[in-house]
Image (spheres, rainbow, N blue to C red):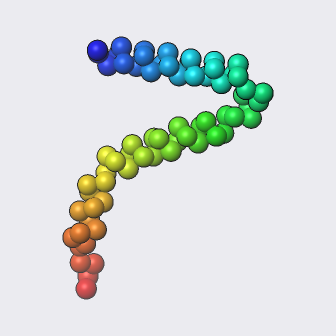
Amino acid sequence: MTQFDNIESIEKRLWSSADTLRSNSNYASNEYLLPVMGFIFLRHAYSRYLAVKPEIEAALRYPKNRGT
């Protein structure tokens, strides 16, 4: 599966989920927009954290002397 196929698959799943949410909810889209965007942001932040986690751990293990 190429990266483009993977993106298309994810896009189809997202649209399907959005359609399900709209059809099975008594809420208007503006009422569930912020919680959904919050989840997307948290996932993005977690991915960014995982990318730099080894650097953070290394810095905690071996702190640099700051002029002392």
Task: Work out whether residue 32 can be spotted.
Answer: yes
Q: Can you name the residue that lies furthest to the front here?
A: 24
- 47 sits left or right of 53 in the view: right
Q: Residue at x 56, y 18 (%)?
A: 15
Q: Is residue 55 above or below residue 48?
A: below
Q: Residue at x 47, y 41 (%)?
A: 43
- 66 sits left or right of 28 in the view: left
Nearer to the camera, 3 or 13: 13
Nearer to the camera, 10 or 48: 10
Task: Work out whether residue 28 can be spotted.
Answer: no
Quadrant housing the C terminus = bottom left
Q: Is residue 65 above or below residue 19?
A: below
Q: Is residue 19 above or below residue 66?
A: above
- Residue 35, image x, y percentages: 64, 40
**Which picture quadrant has residue 20?**
top right
Q: Is residue 55 above or below residue 64?
A: above
Quadrant housing the N terminus = top left
Nearer to the camera, 22 or 60: 22
Q: Residue at x 66, y 39 (%)?
A: 34
- Residue 16, image x, y percentages: 56, 17
Q: Residue at x 25, y 72 (%)?
A: 63
- 58 sits left or right of 49 in the view: left
Count of numbered badges drawn on the protein: 0
- 46 sits left or right of 51 in the view: right
- Residue 54, image x, y percentages: 26, 55
**Which picture quadrant has residue 37?**
top right
- Residue 44, image x, y percentages: 45, 41
